Amino acid sequence: MVVMISPTSNLTKHFLIAMPALVDPNFARTVTLIAEHNDQGALGVIVNRPLDMNLAALFDRIDLPIEDAETAGQPVYFGGPVQTDRGFVLHRPAGEWHSSLAIGDDAALTSSKDILQSVGSGGGPDEVLVTLGYAGWSPGQLEQELAQNAWLTVPADLSIVFDIPPEERFAAAMQLIGVDYATLSEVAGHA
């Protein structure tokens, strides 16, 4: 089933799944969670591209302590090509943090240091994914990319982000819409 997206569709809390024709190396074979989509544009984070850095190294770089060894070993992710020197924390539950963007009722994207301090001391949200950078689209840009068949969209299932290893998230997101990536053509047709 192909879902047509109208220009007024809100893709907040949806996955964008890169199509084979998307040649931008920042987004090839990625799954991006859209945290906000409105008439001002869209913002999201890539959830399946871990960097060669763990939370211990990141916390050391920003001079924050981290107590739990398991948490310290979690990977940091490439969230997108915008502001790659800035951290973003995708988490659930949403909680109350200084600079958070709610993603539905149960999750948020936070960019303030208070959440990292809480994660470091063992008091942070139950589930976290830390990224450097984010993906952003200007007004109408995402809609144009969708019209050019650069992305598939599907309502996000956050268990894919928090319960499945990063190398399996792309296939799991594709399965949400019943598509096998190997069978996709670089050019989509329209009926």
Image (spheres, helix red, strand yellow):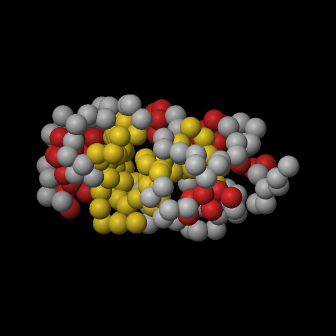
Residue 116 seen in render: no
Is residue 158 rendered to the left or right of residue 128? Answer: right
Q: Position of residue 128 (x, y in %)?
A: 33, 40
Residue 85 seen in render: yes
Q: What quarter of the picture does the N terminus occupy?
A: top right
Q: Nearer the viewer, residue 81 or 7?
A: 7
Q: Nearer the viewer, residue 24 or 144?
A: 144
Residue at image point 76% right, 60% down: 186
Q: How many marks?
A: 0
Is residue 188 rendered to the left or right of residue 116? Answer: right
Residue, far bottom: 24
Q: Is residue 79 above or below residue 107?
A: below
Q: Position of residue 63 (x, y in %)?
A: 14, 58
Q: Position of residue 53 (x, y in %)?
A: 34, 57
Q: Is residue 54 above or below residue 122?
A: below
Residue, far right: 191
Quadrant location of residue 90?
A: top left
Q: Position of residue 159 (x, y in %)?
A: 48, 32
Q: Nearer the viewer, residue 127 or 52?
A: 127
Residue at image point 82% right, 53% down: 190
Residue at image point 43% right, 47% down: 35
